[in-house]
Amino acid sequence: MALPLEGVRVIDFTRVLAGPHCTKHLLDLGAEVIKIEPPRGDISRFAFPRRDEISDYYAQQNAGKRNLSIDLNVPQAREAVLQLCDTADIIVENFRPGALASFGLDYQSVAARNPAVVYASISGYGQTGPWRTRMAYAPTVQAEVGFTQNTLRQFGVDGDDRRSDSLSHGDVYAGLHAVIAVLAALQHRRVTGEGQYVDVAMAAVLTPLNERVHYDLSDVELGAETPILGAADCVFFTSPEGHQFVSPMSLVGSMSFPFYLHAMRRPDLADDPRFRTPELRRQHLGELHAIVQTWIYTFDSMDSLDAQFDEAKIATG
């Protein structure tokens, strides 16, 4: 079966994760992707672990792409790459804004020769504005838009575990949004014949994805209630076999607490003076968690526990 982007050529100036993640999806949709790298290689080539001297990290995002190793500091090399860009349907880059302009490979230079090109730039804070040249990596942008604070608030140990999320959400989400934008620009070109410049800012991508923005900016006092249907108050438990698992159902919230009572067949806890209100459940959360955990240990296996949770409409994973 033919893939939707067969016959489409992508010139890939990207490195590390956000950009390579975008172009890997374009490759999977059938596009030909030619990755441009300096002679020393994309920095992700040096990441561990490695198999047969090839970085797993690099292979995950770049397997299947064609490759051109070339030094853009050499004028003849720049001209050769510019001629390659003349044949491109799509160009993707994720350098700091303005970096490729110094090589004459920015959108204006390429589009002057190839006006139908779709050119996408992925950066931390976009191509315009006071932070356009600010250094940006997923952990720093995640911190700026509130993701890291939510990680500390929800998953830190007693709120004191000063750590960031180990996953580069900003890179992956920015890459996926770039794919969406590039496909929209291709459709625009199909209809109008015009190319387009696509500016993807990691911060702009992440801000609306932060489910707690509405809560953090609200002036309404919620007390101990959970701000978004319990999803932000997910709870960790230990399975009968000793493995950790998580439920997105809050032990505190008024909407989710009754589900646990049903699962445990403990309606009496609704009248327990410690657990009558969200505020009280928040105050006595350790005791409530211990009750649920003790009940979990009465099961022989996670399979039998899952059946009980499923019957009570409590998701686990």
Image: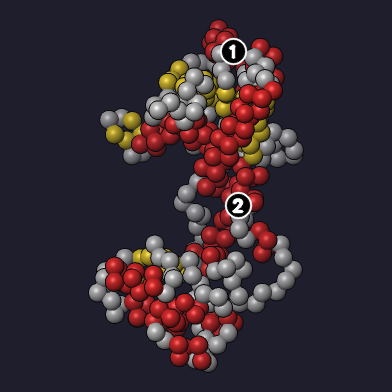
Residue type at the position of mark 2: Leu
Kind of element beneath mark 2: helix
Seen at 59% across and 12% down, the residue is 86
Residue receiving disc 1: 86
Seen at 58% across and 40% down, the residue is 177
Q: Is residue 130 left or right of residue 252?
A: right
Q: Nearer the viewer, residue 212 or 55?
A: 212
Q: Is residue 215 left or right of residue 164?
A: right
Residue type at the position of mark 1: Asp
Q: Quadrant of residue 39?
A: top left
Kind of element beneath mark 1: loop
Seen at 58% across and 81% down, the residue is 278
Residue with the most extreme top position: 76
The circle on residue 209 is 2
Q: CA distance from mark 2 to mark 1?
A: 36 Å
**Where does the image place residue 227, in percent across and percent down from the top left?**
62, 68
Q: Are marks 2 and 1 in contact (CB under 8 Å)?
A: no
Quadrant of the drawing holding the C terminus: bottom left
Q: Nearer the viewer, residue 312 or 229?
A: 312
Mark closer to the chain start, 2 or 1 = 1
